[in-house]
Amino acid sequence: MVIVKRKELSFWERLYLPEVVRGLSVTMRAIFRRKITRQYPEEPLATNEVTRGQPRLAVNEDDTIRCVSCGLCEIACPAYAITIDGQETDRFIEREPERFDIDMLRCILCGFCEEACPKDAIFMSEELELADFSREALVYDIEKLKRPISALQRRSDYVYKLNDRWHSSSSTS
Amino acid sequence: MTTIQINGKDVEVDPKQPLIHALHTNGCDVPMYCYHPGLSPVGSCRICQVEVQQGEGPSRVVVSCRTPVADGMRVFPDSEKAHDVRRECLEFLLKNHPLDCPICDKAGECDLQDYSFAEGQGEGRSVEPRRKLEKRKSLGDVIVLDEERCILCSRCVRFMEEVPKTPQLTVADLGARSVIATFMDRPLTGKYQGNLADVCPVGALTLSAFRFQARVWNLTKTTGTCGECSRGCSVTTEVLRGGELKRFRPRYNADVNTWWMCDVGRFAIEEHSLEGRLVGALVRGSRELEPADPFDAIDRAADVFTAPGHPVVIASPWLTVEEGERLRDLAEALGSEVHFLSPPANDLADDLLHTGDPCPNRRGLEGLGFSPIDAEAALELLSGATSALICGERIGALLGEGLGELPEKLRLVVLDTMPLDVPAVRAELGVPSSIERTGTWINVDGHAGKLGIARSAPPGVAPLVQTLDDLVARLSTTATAGGER
Ligand code: SF4
Ligand code: SF4
Ligand code: SF4
Ligand code: FES
């Protein structure tokens, strides 16, 4: 237990009114300063390519999903948020996910899945908001995760650039 | 015994085995693709090369899978020269290999992937386009061939020639155009095709049944024993996320199955399906079978058995020795004889592994004093009795339709994996299937095969040993209390 000693008030302070005026003067000064409060959610957060929002699956222009259900993001995910089952397709790339679930409540937005993906199929989107009425609804299935690649383009370009930098600095041998 | 020197250390090795065997048994992980301990060596992939010096002469680089050991040989598997030649071989093997590990079913257990990861270079130097070949060529019902992934090690060709002795695969065409093929693209036949997917060191031959079913690193692997015939091949049971059984793979056992297993056992996956399993217990209410607490079901069973008369006891051939012992003790206490259901031999027998006898524990149960009886005789025995216990995995299915015609005066207690809804049943309890319990089966030659728990049984299903123990305990309290509850 800690006993907190009250500060002894001086006579001036005990007069009360001067202190009220001093407090109000702080308020008055702040009113005319530049406002820094953001009116969230009416005013959305500014994002840029470094923003690591929730992971989303990229869909090509021709409506095919890029993911081949290789499971690398699943094994890379430190939060065990991803569950994938594969299936066969008629496309040239023979495999695609039948089930692709990300438990958004587990996801820690670390971006490891994006980094692990050999197919540039999963990107950290700019979507940051997460709310629903049940836990089940926050386990996103493949339909909820699909995004056209145009929506992820900025991040995709950024990741390519990062990888290039990594390649040129590490392939010394 | 021959003495050779590996990395400057003297070791005793088996003179009948090639050098690679000596290296592997002494902790040197020399890679290999074309060599398989169960097949004749051909020395075609050259990835197993090591540096060897004999006497005072200059050292040479040799393929360790085709080199016999000789006294005084000095082997340097990790020397710079050995590494260099292996790395060069690897580069050639990868020259035409497609980079499709992300969709390849072998990824995670692929020798080519492992060794490329350990030793290979990050980037290829070749500028020529890779070979374009057929990527999903069906070789019958069991195997799919991806020609691009094949490294032409010819293990599959030799397997077909040497193990089931039904040569069907060959290396067709010449040089850079070589591919693995069957004659006139005929589908493969035989009961040992599944092993091709295991011998193929890369993902060229894969099982169509396992195609894209799971990533191998997500499978939990447990040692077990195959229960589809009395050979009892040692297997690895692989289960996805603690639930669905995805595949059986043979596990090396010199006394029983060496490296192989037959397709009958390999594809006995449905038998362990979780669908429709008897979970918990059922007892007969006024008319219908109703879900009940397992303890109530045991009480009910005890009531059935304390009625006058000797109950008929029939066990499933999948009962383990441990469970058989408990069941025999129970039967002894009840004054009954023990039988086990022995279906007639099927026509799957061959001279490699499959025995044609579907009872994996025939030797074990016979040794415990169980007498074999076929389904017809069992049903006859049951229809003449007033109470009976049928016990073990798949027993209801083995007895078949006839169970429905048993007289209602028969009071039947069932311990089975699947629910059984026939009028004679008074109480039934779920039991674990053979991938959900431990125990021992004795195979046709007297070798013990251990069962392993690859996944937990469905909730409410206790091990059979425990259920039988509970039943015995319950019966003995009934006896001391003079039949009162
Ligand atoms: S961002 Fe991190 S935690 Fe979220 S799914 Fe990807 S790997 Fe898992
Ligand atoms: S790593 Fe990429 S391609 Fe592989 S499963 Fe994840 S999203 Fe799909
Ligand atoms: S299919 Fe597999 S086992 Fe057969 S030659 Fe090709 S790589 Fe070897
Ligand atoms: S393993 Fe020795 S040459 Fe292929």
Image: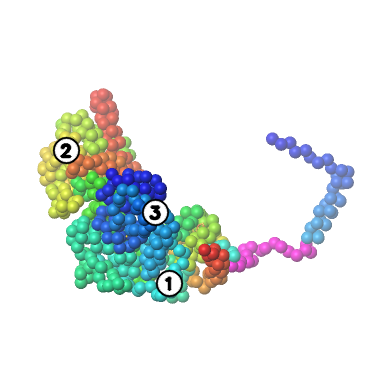
Q: Quadrant of residue B432?
A: top left
- Which numbered disc, 3 or 1, marks the residue that appears first in the sequence? 3
Mark 1 and mark 3 in contact (Cβ < 8 Å)?
no
Label 2 vs label 1, nearer the camera:
1
Which image quarter is the N terminus of chain A in?
top right
Q: Nearer the viewer, residue A107 or B407?
A: A107
Chain for numbered disc 1? B
What's the distance in space between the residues labelled 3 and 1, CA to CA?
27 Å
Chain for numbered disc 3: B
* Vertical placement of residue A109 versus B485, above or below: below
> Which span is picked out in magenta?
A31-49
Mark 2 burial class by Cα count in 10 Å: few <14, some 14-19, many 20+? some
Task: Name the image quarter holding residue B282.
Answer: top left
- Does residue A140 appear left or right of residue B238 in this picture? right
The image's mark for residue A78 is none
| Predominant SS along the magenta part | loop
Type of amino acid under label 1: Ser
Q: Mark 3 highlights which residue?
A: B77
Location of residue B68 with respect to B130 vertically, above or below: above
**Please, is residue B362 above or below residue B171 in the view?**
above
SS under mark 1? loop
Give the distance between the C-alpha atoms of the residues marked 2 and 1, in whole angstroms. Answer: 65 Å
Q: Are marks 2 and 3 on the same chain?
A: yes
Residue A25 image offset from top left, x and y in percent: 83, 57
Left or right, A25 with respect to B336, comes to: right
Q: Is residue B419 magenta?
A: no
Mark found first going from the N terminus, 2 or 3: 3
Q: Which three-letter amino acid code belongs to the residue tagged 3?
A: Pro
Answer whether residue A41 is magenta in the image.
yes
Q: Which residue is mark 2?
A: B366
